Image (tube, rainbow, N blue to C red):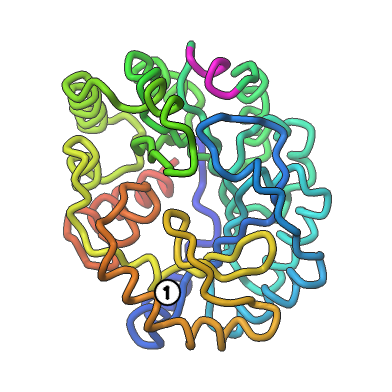
Amino acid sequence: MNMKIRNFTPLIIIKAIWQLWVKKGPLILSHGINSECNLRCKFCIYWEERLKEMEKEEIFRLLDEASSLGVLAYNVWTAEPLVRKDLPECLEYAKSLGMITFMVTNGVLLKERVDELSSLDYLSVSVDGTKSYEKLRGVDLGRVLDGINAAIKKGIPIVINCVLNGRNLDEIEDLVKIVEDLGIWISFEPLYEYEDISQDVWDELGIRNPEKYRKTVDRIIELKREGSPILNSYTYLRMIRDLDPDLHCHVNDLILHVSSNGELENCRVYRQNMGDVEGSLGKVWEYSKYKRNKISEECEGCLFFGYAELSLLYSLKPEVILNCTRIFRRFIRS
């Protein structure tokens, strides 16, 4: 592996422990930094919304308030962060506050903008297959891989995130081979069927062959045991194999979800408005605590990779902690 850990010092780990278990404050600001996208994926709910976007100065104030709350990481995503021209300035400002910076992207604009991303610590690129990729996303996979290679040359640690769906189950080993050849990491999660999208889409892309899906995830587990650079824990992989979210969700303890128009949302599934952050992010976070907790208690659970793994880690599940330790060691040795 040629990816190095950035900014994960012992001090950061101590700060995270203090923030979560002593201050009981959020760890991550997950920001839908814009509502524009350069793709029109029919399984996505975000590119059609066209919400008002926060101005750069408003984002800076948001970051100031998040920093004062003890937030340690700034994650930009949706609809496509690289469409936003002032993205590098926002990342740089978060960096100046001592935050670790993440970005989730479709990767289409990565090659042409990678030189602007000097303040980016970690990168997640959505790649949902090999042969099926162009049909799913409407763009040639080679263009995205060119962007990934450009980011690798810049030394940015990269994870490819693959959403398992009805079209790509035969392509997983090929995708893992690509990741191994690139010297990066891969994570998996099952497709989430949003109610706002036509049932015809889910009939086409949804997981409709449970036996084949289960065998595919079993093979992912085998590949991980064989040493493939798969980020997911075995605990999580077994849950997605069984499509059983056997966990207590702690997302509302860990993450501040802010939409592109400046609303605090409880999570990316239910997306209930907890309040406008323009007044005071801290007050909205505090005043919405009861409502957020009630939603978590009533939630039937989801299997989004980040949500589930973070919740399992927060719950101190031994195998998940061990998986994180192994990954850190592999990063450090690379």
Query: Does residue 2 show up magenta in the picture?
Result: no
Quadrant the N terminus occupies:
top left
Q: Quadrant of residue 90?
A: bottom right
Q: Note whether 36 is above or below 199 in the view shown.
A: below
Q: In the image, residue 81 lies at what x, y percent?
A: 69, 47
In this view, 131 is above or below 266: above
In the image, taking residue 308 as reference, residue 143 lies left or right, namely right
Q: Which residue range is magenta in the image?
A: 132-137
In this view, 297 is above or below 152: below
Instruction: Pinpoint residue 159: horizontal percent, then vertical percent.
Output: 48, 39
Residue 259 drawn above or below residue 283:
above
Name which residue lies at 35% across and 87% down. 22
Residue 195 location (% of width, % of height): 42, 43
What residue sits 58% from the left and 30% below the top? 41
Mark 1 lies on a secondary structure that is helix
Residue nearest the observer in this picture, 148 or 196: 196
Which residue does the image show at 70% across and 39% down from the upper left?
Answer: 37
Q: Which residue is mark 1?
A: 16
> In this rendering, would 275 be left or right of 186?
right
Q: Residues within 10 Å of mark 1 (few under 14, many from 20)?
A: many
